[in-house]
Amino acid sequence: MTQKQEMGRLAMRVEGDLWVAYYALPKTMDGALFLGSIQMAFVQDESAKQIFMALMRDAVSLIIKGQTGVDPEWPDPFGKPSPQHERGGRA
């Protein structure tokens, strides 16, 4: 049986008027890789928000598979709030 290991995560942050996606290592934002961003006005629509999150999750999956050769497993339900010390905010 293979033990599961967290290779990284999709970190979503509000930065000004943008919702920004990063690939980050577990428990830190140090060295996080920018993946993409979208205007907050667009993600007020739940379906648009879910589409953007799925696109960013797929990008992280490609990064992890490229590094390990293994498709990552995502928790269900997908997403959990980030720790307070990692949260961005609107300026």
Image (cartoon, rainbow, N blue to C red):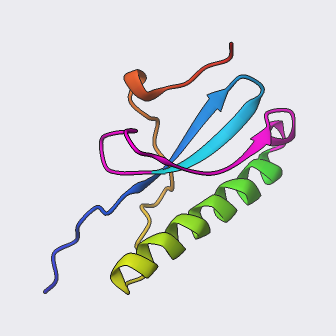
- At horizontal 52% and vertical 65% (from top left) the residue drawn is 60
Foreground pick, 53 / 65:
65
71 with respect to 59 (left or right): left
Q: The N terminus lies in which quarter of the figure?
A: bottom left
Q: 28 or 31, which lies in front?
A: 31
- Image coordinates of residue 90 in percent, x first then y, are 68, 17
Q: Is residue 76 magenta?
A: no
Q: Which residues are magenta?
A: 24-45
**Which quadrant holds residue 91?**
top right
Percent of width and height locating residue 64: 42, 72
Compared across the picture, whether 91 is left or right of 23 comes to right
Relative to 78, say whether 3 is above or below.
Answer: below
Residue drawn at x 61%, y 20% is 89
Rendered image quadrant of residue 17: top right
Tell me if residue 81 comes above or below residue 88 in the rendering: below
| Above or below, 23 relative to 74 | above
